[in-house]
Image (spheres, grey):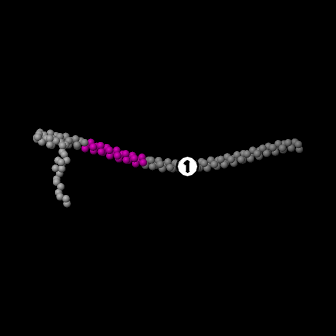
Amino acid sequence: MPLFGGRASMLEVQNQALIKTAKERAQRIEELECELQTLRETVQTLRQTVEHQTDKLRRELQQARSEIERLTLERDFYSKRALALEQHNREVTEAATKYSLWGQRLERELAKIDPDGARARQFGAWSASQVSALEPPLRGAA
């Protein structure tokens, strides 16, 4: 059996090498499966975090859109209000100018009619005492 003895011993050495390699491969597969499980858990945690952050950002975006809409409406309101006030100021200025010119014209006409009393009637020269003299006297306290 010397012929088969060498062959058997060679097969046994190869078998032991294959067993050793298979054990190493099984151990490596186990390590990789543990690492894969850890990575799966990490991915799940990251997904949950991303979903949470996404929901939070969606809420913030909706709030920002609502705020933008509110501010746009406010801006439009105040813009229209400012335009209306500017128009009103123009009208008041025109009326004041008109009445000022009318008062000056009346003052000039009165000065032509009564040149001696022109100084007392000078437009804008009314004092508080002259105004109070025009007001009706107060009656006795009730």
- Nearer to me, 93 or 104: 104
Mark 1, residues whose alpha carbon is within 10 Å: few (<14), some, or many (≥20)?
Answer: few
Magenta-highlighted residues: 67-92
Residue found at x 76% / y 45%: 20
Residue 66, given in percent of the width and then of the height, sits at: 43, 49
Left or right: 79 with respect to 59? left
**Can I make out residue 78 in this image?**
yes
Residue found at x 17% / y 51%: 135
Q: Which residue is mark 1?
A: 49
Residue 116, given in percent of the width and then of the height, sits at: 11, 40
Q: Secondary structure at mark 1?
A: helix
Give yes or no for residue 76 being in the magenta stretch.
yes
Residue 18, given in percent of the width and then of the height, sits at: 77, 44
The amino acid type, in three-letter code, at marker 1 is Thr
Give yes or no for residue 118 being in the magenta stretch.
no
Q: Quadrant of the N terminus?
A: top right
**Can I make out residue 106 in this image?**
no
